[in-house]
Image: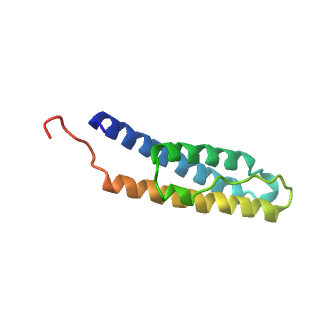
Amino acid sequence: MSPHTDNTSRDERMILLGMIRTLLNDLKTIQQLGAGYYDSGSFISRYNKLLEVARDLFPGSRMMETFSPIEYVKSVDPVDKMKMTQKVLIEGGQLISLIESSLDRAPESTTAGE
């Protein structure tokens, strides 16, 4: 893999990390308003899209195999909404941990002379 590709991949992982963190923060904010006032469908859809990006950034990773898309079940029941919300929060947190771990192990940058 070329140094440019390594840096591009690192940049994409950093961007993805920020996007997942923002999604989880937004979800927590909406959740605090009360289960009757939000629909978790948009959060689940967004999480699933970000999960697909993560799969592209970690091809062949056994750790990525531990993640599955979250199924959206339309419901007005606050308990159902809370369960779906918790899934996004838990899975998103685990995905953040995976990305952070990969960034900790990856070199910051490479130079042409190395």
Viewer-proximal residue, 99 or 64? Answer: 64
Residue at image position (85%, 55%) is 75
Q: Position of residue 19 (x, y in %)?
A: 53, 45
Colour scheme employed for the rendering of this structure: rainbow
Q: Is residue 101 left or right of residue 70?
A: left
Most extreme residue toward the front is 60
* Quadrant including the N terminus: top left
Q: In which quadrant is the C terminus drawn?
A: top left
| Figure quadrant of residue 13 | top left
Residue 83, placed above or below residue 103: below
Which residue is depicted at the point 58% across and 57% down?
Answer: 67
Residue 63 coordinates in the image, percent (x, y): 48, 59
Residue farthest toward the right in the current orientation of the protein: 76
**In the rendered image, the vertical position of residue 99 relative to residue 7, given as above or below:** below
Q: Residue at x 63, y 47 (%)?
A: 48
- Residue 12's spot in the image, x, y percent? 43, 40
Q: Position of residue 18 (x, y in %)?
A: 48, 46
Residue in front for this viewpoint, 65 or 54: 65
> With respect to residue 36, does 50 lie above or below?
above
